[in-house]
Amino acid sequence: MTNPNTFQSEDEFSPKRYWIQLIIWSLCLTIPLGGLAVIAYAAGYYSATQSPTDLWIMLIGIPIVLISGYVLWRTMPDFTMGEPDTVRGRRIKWTTLGAGFLGGLTTIPLIDFENGGTLLFSNGSVPSTQAMFAMAMWAAILPVFIIIHRRNADEVAREANDFGFMVGFQSFSVIAPVWWIGWRGGLLPQPDVMLLFVTVLIIACAAIIWRRST
């Protein structure tokens, strides 16, 4: 897998190749992340039951996580659309990684392995401690990453972000009232705020990617 950090000039940079690599790398990231979840799950059961099966899962899973994590670290995209390796570019890279890590961290207290993750993927009640942890992470730390990224982004990146989130909000201004009135009219299910959030976020990110690639 080609490391984008080897790109030395704008003429050599290919947006298509960059996004293909980014997508493949993101999909491969599920290997160590999923492995960590399985290891944690097995460790919890092993401490209670001393099951040999759980022990083998940990012994096999730990090397897989370490090796795959090292490979992904060595081939990690720069997250800066091929910009030169500068102080500003490194800040953008680490704030992007930090925001992604924070997003994953906020979901950990809501993962219910015994019930197939229904606590995370539902609108049911959440224990107060887990809820306060997730709220604090999202409301207090995420804005810091956003501000740092905004301050270090160049004019092209800021314009693309502004365009993407403008498209996202315009999508929200159409989807939300249509869904709401459709529900009240008995034509659609009850609006789900998180499903709406994820949909609008995907639209905004797609618009940013398109703007940066044109």
Image (cartoon, grey):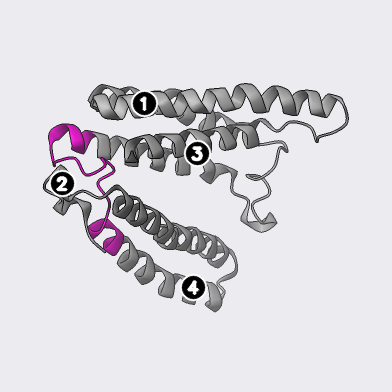
Along the polypeptide, which appears first: circle 4 or circle 2?
2
Residue shown at 46% from the left, 44% from the top? 104
- Residue 84 part of the magenta-drawn span: yes
For the C terminus, give its image quadrant.
top left
Which residue does the numbered mark 4 point to in the structure image? 57
Secondary structure, mark 4, is helix
Along the polypeptide, which appears first: circle 3 or circle 4?
4
Q: What kind of residue is marked 2?
A: Asp
The residue closer to the viewer here, 187 or 58, is 187
Q: CA distance from mark 1 to mark 2?
A: 29 Å
Residue sitting farthest toward the right: 186
Image height of 27 relative to 166, above or below = below
Image height of 187 relative to 6, above or below = above
Indicate which label's residue lies in the foreground, 1 or 3.
1
Which region shows up in magenta? 70-91
The residue closer to the viewer here, 176 or 156, is 156
Checking the image for residue 11, the label placed there is 2
Which residue does the numbered mark 1 point to in the structure image? 146
Q: CA distance from mark 4 to mark 2?
A: 47 Å
The residue closer to the viewer here, 188 or 111, is 188
